[in-house]
């Protein structure tokens, strides 16, 4: 049967749209998205756009979807999906650094399981950021990301807007509304791989501790520089006051010595 289908309030899963009549890619929307996002140059162009604006990058992604045979994903929903993935990854990393160092394979397996529950795409996104605990997020997206993390938005499904009525293929409503909330069964990994993961977690926590130490030292140095700048300004001001006759020589010496003491203690 062929008829015009209205997309208003029609939910299309990102993970289970492989068999939809409008999908001619042979892949789910999530698979197509991750195929694009896991290319390093594509990933960096999105999280830290320099040569192109974020809007221009989204146009490229939307065209990539169309080239792969998926024309019903709009740039707004694609951006929402990517931001949700990156938000989940950041949440998983923050959770990880708060965990105690795993002492055995079971604890390592538990940590891995929790990471994948927080972010299904963790293993795919992690290599793009390397071993950095805090990968650094583009400032222009910080507010959006924080809001979405707080609201815990679910972007696994998309409400299609009315307007794509040029398609005459009828999507099964039963298939459309059949969502998949399960994260899937984790694949068993070898003991050597789990031991390597445990070592990786320990190295990540050591790196985090080192970063915290460096931040403390940099903060102390910044405060010291501010103190030096302040006392130098005081000395210059005292010199001007003495030259103008507002303070005596004795006052100038006494107050200047106090300022020099402040410099030594900075």
Image (spheres, rainbow, N blue to C red):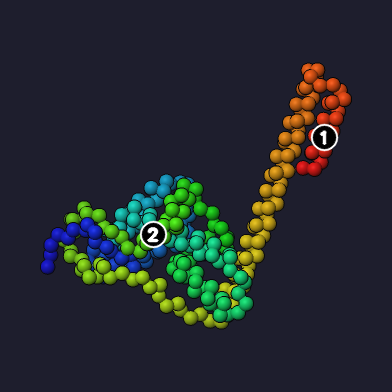
* Mark 2, residue position: 153
Compared across the picture, whether 257 is left or right of 204 comes to right
Between marks 2 and 1, how big is the CA–CA gap?
58 Å
Query: Which residue appears at 65% of the width and 61% of the height?
Result: 209
Q: Nearer the viewer, residue 131 or 93?
A: 93
Which disc number belongs to residue 258?
A: 1
Q: Position of residue 137 (x, y in %)?
A: 51, 53
Determine whether the residue tagged by mark 1 lies in a helix, strand or loop: helix
Q: What residue lies at 31% left-to-right and 69% top-to-bottom? A: 179
Q: Quadrant of residue 5?
A: bottom left
How packed mark 2 is, by other alpha carbons closer than 10 Å (few <14, some 14-19, many 20 or more), is few
Closest to the camera, between mark 2 and mark 1, is 1
Can residue 146 be seen here? The reply is: yes
Answer few, some or many: residues within 10 Å of disc 1's Cα (few below 14, many 20 plus, some between 14 and 19): few
Residue 24 % position (x, y): 26, 65
Residue 26 visible at all: no
Closer to the camera in the image, 64 or 144: 144
- The residue lying furthest to the top in this view is 245
Q: At x 41% / y 60%, what residue is drawn?
A: 152
Quarter of the picture containing the C terminus is top right
Can you tell which mark lies on residue 187?
none
Quarter of the image for residue 197 reads bottom right
Task: Measuring from the top left, give residue 77's x and y in whole percent.
Answer: 34, 56
Q: Is residue 43 above or below residue 114?
A: above
Q: Quadrant of the N terminus?
A: bottom left
Label 2 sits on a secondary structure element that is loop
Left or right: residue 104 versus residue 230 is: left
Indicate the position of residue 18 as horizontal and vertical percent values.
Answer: 29, 69
Check the image and report above or below for 252 versus 127: above
The quadrant where residue 193 appears: bottom right
Callouts 2 and 1 close, C-beta under 8 Å: no
């Amino acid at each position: 049967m062929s008829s015009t289908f209205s997309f208003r309030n029609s939910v299309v899963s990102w993970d289970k749209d492989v068999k939809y009549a409008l999908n001619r890619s042979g892949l789910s929307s999530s698979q197509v998205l991750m195929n694009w996002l896991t290319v390093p140059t594509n990933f960096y162009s999105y999280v830290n756009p320099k040569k192109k604006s974020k809007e221009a990058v989204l146009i490229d992604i939307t065209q990539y979807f169309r080239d792969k045979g998926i024309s019903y994903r709009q740039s707004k929903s694609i951006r929402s999906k990517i931001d949700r993935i990156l938000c989940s990854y950041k949440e998983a990393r923050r959770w990880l650094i708060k965990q105690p160092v795993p002492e055995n394979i079971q604890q390592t397996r538990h940590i891995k399981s929790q990471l994948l529950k927080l972010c299904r795409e963790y293993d795919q996104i992690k290599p793009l950021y390397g071993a950095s605990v805090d990968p650094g997020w583009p400032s222009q997206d910080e507010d959006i990301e924080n809001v979405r993390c707080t609201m815990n938005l679910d972007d696994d499904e998309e409400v299609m807007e009315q307007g794509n009525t040029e398609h005459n293929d009828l999507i099964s409503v039963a298939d459309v509304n059949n969502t998949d909330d399960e994260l899937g069964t984790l694949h068993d990994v070898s003991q050597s791989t789990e031991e390597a993961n445990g070592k990786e977690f320990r190295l990540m926590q050591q790196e985090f501790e080192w970063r915290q130490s460096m931040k403390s030292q940099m903060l102390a140095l910044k405060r010291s520089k501010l103190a030096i700048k302040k006392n130098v300004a005081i000395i210059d001001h005292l010199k001007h006051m003495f030259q103008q006759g507002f303070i005596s020589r004795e006052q100038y010496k006494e107050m200047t010595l106090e300022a020099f003491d402040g410099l030594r203690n900075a």
